[in-house]
Amino acid sequence: MVNSTLCPSDNQQTIDQEGFWSTDGIHWDAHRIGWLIAGACAAVTVVLTVINVGFHATHYTNRGEQRQIIRILYMPAVYAIISFFSYRFFRSYTYYDLIETAYESVTLSAFLLLLIEFVAATAAEHDVDNAILRKDKEALPIPFCCWRYRPTKAYFMYTVKWSVLQYVILRPLLSIAGIVCQYYGVLCESGPWSFKTAHAYITVIDGVSISIALYGMLVFYGLTKDELKGRKPLSKFMSIKLIVMFTFYQGLVFDALEGRVIKATEYWTETNIADGLNALAICIEMVLFSAFMLYAYSWREYVVPGRPRTSVWRPLWDSINYSDFAHEIVGSVRFFVDYARGKPGTHGPRVQVTDAQTGKTHTKMDFGEAFGILPRPYEHAAYPMASAATGRAGAVLWWACRPVSG
């Protein structure tokens, strides 16, 4: 079912019946050479990824950090494998491409949680106020640099976190919608740009969503760059950001070359060739990025002398168990619901808590407690920054707000 006026077919009617191996040997045309290069590069990428993941898994001494690192390390291998299959089975390229981009959201969210782990560890080792509470008003990055924000507000860090986590929800949903639309012939990736097609809406929503995610990441990095010194945050971020940029912009370049430099052949349309070149380029690039990640996400800093190697099964399970994502998303949604309802503790600065049963007074939360990484100072909180009284626990909460200028 194809809308013929807007959705021209991505594929030629004539299908090449030959496989890689022919009865009289290999005919080394451009497609088969590309096939070989894509497969070899994908294999090298997988080997480099397995080496890095394997060393992290056998030196699994910091679960909170390495769980996210392993998820990030999967990115080049996932892209290389899917790109190889999209090159090999080019008539189904769109389906593979939509699956590939869905993992991008997982990687960005894992990177944010990794940075949170880094900052929380710094706060726990030194003064708890050094993480966030000492921060003063700062200007937002370009293009909103004329606006200033105060990070000590309870809702601010939830906003930054949600700006990234929203992408891990929207991107997979967009991929699913794209797959369904492609099946029914209304996606129209190769047709003219029109808001009568599903592709236009998916592209716009995806562009807005990832822009918000990357901006939130930039705000977070600018806020905590002092605490992240020595952890190679820029190298870690660029290893992800460059993959996203390369795959996005080179796709635009190949699309622009359709009908101008790229011409259709007997078996391949202009779109087939452009998609194939994009997939081939990704396979080659992932070799470089997987090698770069050996440096950016080195396992050596997690080696503890004298400690025996760990089993690989627990780390691998942690890396594919996304319950921590769900926990963060649910906690953020709960906070914003309470914020909209005007509950105390959601609009002001952070609080001090005194437990009526033990008589202990807890200091203002550090960054790890705010994000649920470290134990909360009081047991029955609905969310880290709230100040709602919990009568059943017998806890008495009060605000100790310091003067805030501006």
Image (cartoon, grey):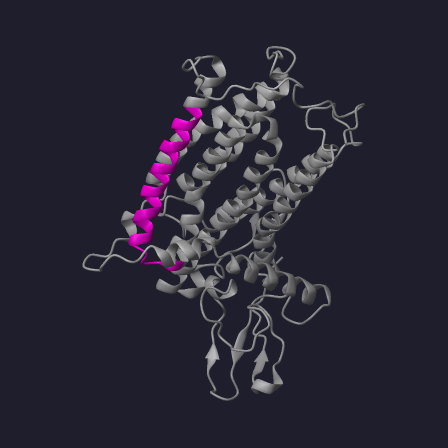
Res 403 seen here = yes
* 37 or 149: nearer the viewer: 37
Seen at 55% across and 62% down, the residue is 327
Seen at 52% across and 35% down, the residue is 244
Residue 307 quadrant: bottom left
List x then y, in percent, for residue 213.
58, 45
Report the quarter where the C terminus lies: bottom right
Relative to 155, does residue 207 appear above or below in the rendering?
above
Per the picture, the main secondary structure of the magenta-coloured stretch is helix
Report the quarter where the N terminus lies: top right
* 268 or 136: nearer the viewer: 268
Residue at the far front in the pictured view: 23
Relative to 169, does residue 291 appear above or below in the rendering?
above
Q: Residue 164 in magenta?
A: no
Q: Residue 62 in magenta?
A: yes
Relative to 130, does residue 44 appear above or below in the rendering?
above
Number of labelled discs? 0
List x then y, in percent, for residue 180.
70, 40
Left-right relation of 68 to 380: left
Residue 61 quadrant: bottom left
* 168 or 123: nearer the viewer: 168
Res 145 seen here = no
Left-right relation of 305 to 271: left
List x then y, in percent, for residue 84.
48, 30
* 281 or 137: nearer the viewer: 281
Left-right relation of 265 to 192: left
Relative to 245, does residue 113 appear above or below in the rendering?
below
**Stretch of the chain drawn in magenta:** 37-63
Seen at 46% across and 33% down, the residue is 80
